[in-house]
Amino acid sequence: MEKPRQGWAGLWNISFGFFGIQIGFALQNANMSRVFQSLGSGIDDLPALWVAAPLTGLLVQPIVGHMSDRTWLGRLGRRRPYFLAGAVLATIALLAMPESAGSSSGLLMAALLLWMLDASLNISMEPFRAFVGDMLRKDQHTAGYGVQTAFIGAGAVVGSLFPYALEHMGVSNVAGAGEIPDTVRYSFWVGGLALLAAVLWTVLTTREYSPQEQAAFGDAHEAETTAAALSDRSLWSALPWIIVGGIVAVAVQGWSLEKEVYLLAALLAGYGIATMAAIGLARSGRSASMLAGIVGDFAGMPPLMKRLAFVQFFSWSALFIMWINTTPVVAQYAFGSADPASAAYQQAGNWVGVLFSVYNGVAAVAALALLPVLSARLGKARTHGLCLVAGALGFGGFMVVRDPTALIACEVGIGIAWASILAMPYAILASSLPQAKLGIYMGLFNVFVVLPQLLVATVMGSIMKAFFPGEPIWTMAFAAGTLLVAAAASLRIEDR
């Protein structure tokens, strides 16, 4: 038996929840630097405050992927319980975020709520990636991820434009020191409710295939147990990770690096310790445990996934640089103000929302109209490389363009790259993975989305402080360079 072919209504229902999730991500990405600076943070402190977001994704997505592969709650299904739980928690975080300004420790409260928001969004997002593979035939994977990307772009447009639209409706866009403008406040509230409504749409309009139905489709066969192979490894094979983590920690002190780099050291050492524990579990016959399963699957990734992971690593480095630095860059170089309390800075913040809506709108259109045409002619891998080059040109444009309106042209290139980053790697990957492990492999693939963000959050501040103090424009040059590296690496992927 084959899975039924889904029509456009089915593709819509499967991915519509991602529209709401991306509204939440867009509000976070376009406004959190602005919120932090409005509450008193300096520009050099932004990476440390942002570090909660990628760290949360690094921890949450593999765990949720592992658990969702093993979940079946009857009528509620396999992946949908995680959609729903994450959406409820994310809505609470969005509703509470504006109240940080009324707290005696507003900056700390905002950072903690960002952590909660990103954890909740990741709980919902990771199963959505696997959900496409669960629900669609392999010959519909490209269409499924294209529709999902279109909803991501559309949701990001809506989320990014909220403050700009509210300002033009007469809502105040200026606030005193330590306060958050009403445009941002109301945007978070409306966005939270929209997120919950969109996820509920997918939960209520879809029915997941039961384990028995997956078996009938031939998709429920057991995948190779990679955790069992850990029992053949020496405990000492994990020691290099711990040593490298210690070296990084010593370098922080010796080279006077930013304190956030200690987090990178802790992650390296932590992975070494986790590997030792997983090897011990496998040797004692407990290879079915979550830790052994996650570490074993990470070590045993298929070769194609490893090559795609390298491309993802450099692609997402550029994106996280953009999300952290676009507001201060546009404010300083296009609006002439680096003071978060100034009207010009707040105006720049709203314009960044417009720019972000442009690249997301371009991505929504490109996912449905451009990528299928290019991939049919060039193949998925070459199409991905070409789109990444377009993104590099967009980032490079920030180095020379000073007219706020002209920056829209830069966002077109970035939008084409964004469409491909969200669709092509998953379309290539989903058809090559065993369905029984689709959740965990999608969660582990996210590690290479999150690791570059952690590196940017921990290392970029030290680089900028040492070589380009007070000149955030150079972060865009770094973003362009990393996308070019990713484009070159994509040529090593065999597109079958």
Image (cartoon, rainbow, N blue to C red):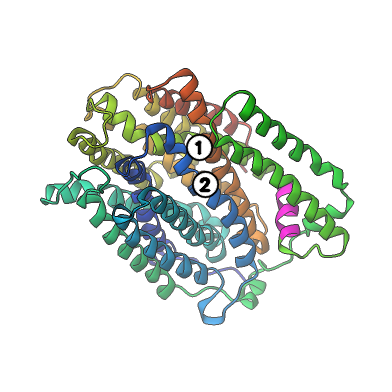
Q: Quadrant of residue 452?
A: top right
Residue 184 placed where, x, y %? 25, 50
Examine the rendered structure and indicate whether residue 300 appears above or below residue 3.
above
At 86% from the left and 43% from the top, the residue drawn is 236
Residue 167 placed where, x, y %? 15, 47
Q: Main secondary structure of the magenta part?
A: helix
Query: What span is colored magenta in the figure?
Result: 291-302
Residue 54's disc is 2
Name the secondary structure under disc 2: helix
Relative to 281, is 247 on the left or the right? left
Q: Residue furthest bottom?
A: 74
Examine the rendered structure and indicate whether residue 54 appears above or below residue 465.
below
Relative to 83, is 183 on the left or the right? left
Q: Earlier in the sequence, mark 2 or mark 1?
A: 2
Q: Nearer the viewer, residue 139 or 246?
A: 246
Name the secondary structure under disc 1: helix
Q: Which residue is mark 1?
A: 457
